[in-house]
Image (spheres, grey):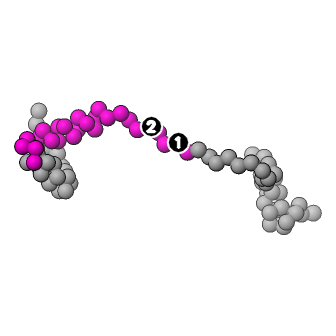
Amino acid sequence: MKTTLNLNDDVFAAAKHLAAVRGTTFTSVVEEALRLLLTAPAAPPYRFDFPVTHGTRPPSIDIDSNAAVDEYFDRLEWGSSPS
């Protein structure tokens, strides 16, 4: 099957050079590269492990309550619960 590809000049030059070194065709190099890419196993999804700390921590707040969040930030700003 024939097709047209638009390749980066550097990629084209590298594939052309590899074909010459191997004594094969440019088409064979491109076909092999595509085959390797298409049959390679998928990379596992990125997993981020959150750090777990033990010891003192700020008091828990209900983040669904605007009043609780406001009170928490007021305590941070004023150093204690404002009256």
Indicate the position of residue 21 as horizontal and vertical percent values.
10, 48
Judge whether 28 appears above or below 67 on screen. above
Q: Which numbered circle lies on residue 10?
A: none
Q: Report, in whole angstroms, how far the alpha carbon at label 1 lies from the one at label 2.
A: 9 Å
Q: Label 2: how many residues lie within 10 Å, few (<14), some (14-19) or many (20+)?
A: few
Residue at image position (75%, 46%) is: 64
Judge by depth and name the residue closer to the eye, 51 or 37: 51
27 is within the stretch colored magenta = yes
User: Residue 71 location in percent, x, y?
Assistant: 83, 57
Question: Type of residue at label 2?
Answer: Pro
Amino acid type assigned to the residue bearing label 1 in the image: Arg
**Quadrant of residue 36 within the rendered picture:** top left
Seen at 12% across and 51% down, the residue is 17
- For label 2, the SS is loop
* Residue at mark 2: 44
Residue lying at 84% horizontally and 67% vertically, measured from the top left: 78
Residue 52: % across, % down: 68, 46
In the image, residue 59 sits, relative to residue 79, either above or below, namely: above
Q: Secondary structure at mark 1?
A: loop
Please state if 79 lies on the left or on the right of 50 as rendered.
Answer: right
Residues at circles 1 and 2 in contact by the CB criterion of under 8 Å: yes
Q: Nearer the viewer, residue 16 or 60?
A: 16
Visible residue check, residue 46: yes
Identify which residue, 54 or 9, lies in the foreground.
54
Residue position marked by numbered label 1 in the rendering: 47
Relative image position of residue 14 (x, y in whole percent):
17, 52
**Up-down relation of residue 80 to residue 18 (above or below):** below
Quadrant of the rendering where the C terminus is positioned? bottom right
* Highlighted magenta segment, given as a residue range: 21-48
